[in-house]
């Protein structure tokens, strides 16, 4: 399980609150998988991500542009990839009567996103905010 800590901070309270919300949802998915209820929670997570991702990414991208963050373009590209990937998982979920592979892929992809995007890309915003 991945818990919020200050090393995840972007320096923008609004964005940090949104990341905390994503981590809380991820924890719910983790707990559901551990309890053998991953199928139901995967549907909730994918529904949540359909709204959350686009909404959050727009705000985060504006912040990166505002603070002239050097990873802004890479961040936008990663966001498009995320939307495509989770869109595909959502389609597979709806078509497959909740295939266990979709459940596992959703968990793994989201875990990877938190570790490899939030911790490595989004946190670079912190230095840009501090420099303004």
Image (cartoon, rainbow, N blue to C red):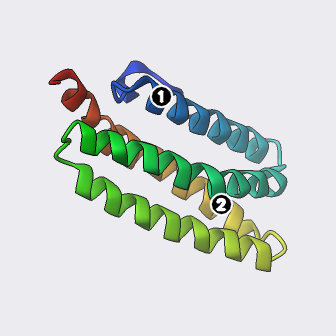
Q: Which circle marks residue 14 in the picture?
A: 1
Q: Quadrant of residue 120?
A: top left
Left or right: 125 with respect to 18? Answer: left
Q: Secondary structure at mark 2?
A: helix
The x and y percentages for residue 113 are: 46, 51
Q: Residue furthest bottom?
A: 95
Judge left or right: residue 30 versus residue 63: right
Q: Residue at x 20, y 31 (%)?
A: 128
**Looking at this view, is 127 or 8 the one in front?**
127
Q: Nearer the viewer, mark 1 or mark 2?
A: 1
Q: Mark on residue 76?
A: none
Which of 107/13 is in front? 13
- Image quarter in which the N terminus is found: top right
Where in the figure is residue 43, as x and y percent of width and height? 77, 58
Q: Earlier in the sequence, mark 1 or mark 2?
A: 1
Q: Label 1, label 2: how many angstroms apart (C-alpha)?
A: 30 Å
- Taking 25 as reference, is 99 above or below it? below
From the viewer's side, name the closer residue of 20 and 38. 20
Q: Position of residue 91 (x, y in %)?
A: 69, 75
Identity of the residue drawn at 52% across and 69% down: 85
Q: Position of residue 65 (x, y in %)?
A: 26, 45
Find numbered disc 1 in the image and state the secondary structure of the residue it sits on: helix
Up the image or down, 95 lies above or below 53; here it is below
Q: Which residue is mark 2?
A: 104
Is disc 1 surrounded by few (<14), some (14 to 19) or many (20+) residues within 10 Å? few
Residue 34 lies, with reference to residue 5, above or below; the image says: below
Residue count near mark 2 (Cα–Cα under 10 Å), binned few <14, some 14–19, many ≥20: some
Specify the quadrant that holds the C terminus. top left
Q: In percent of the image, x 28 and y 42: which residue is there? A: 64
């Amino acid at each position: 399980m991945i818990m919020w800590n200050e090393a995840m901070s972007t320096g923008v309270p609004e964005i940090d609150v949104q990341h905390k919300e994503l981590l809380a949802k991820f924890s719910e998915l983790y707990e559901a998988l551990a309890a053998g209820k991953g199928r139901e929670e995967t549907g909730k997570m994918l529904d949540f991500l359909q709204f959350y991702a686009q909404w959050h990414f727009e705000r985060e991208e504006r912040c990166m542009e505002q603070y002239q963050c050097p990873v802004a373009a890479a961040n936008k590209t990663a966001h498009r990839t995320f939307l495509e990937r989770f869109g595909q998982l959502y389609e597979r979920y709806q078509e497959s009567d909740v295939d266990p592979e979709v459940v596992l892929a959703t968990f793994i992809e989201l875990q990877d996103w938190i570790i490899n995007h939030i911790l490595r890309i989004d946190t670079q915003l912190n230095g840009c905010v501090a420099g303004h």
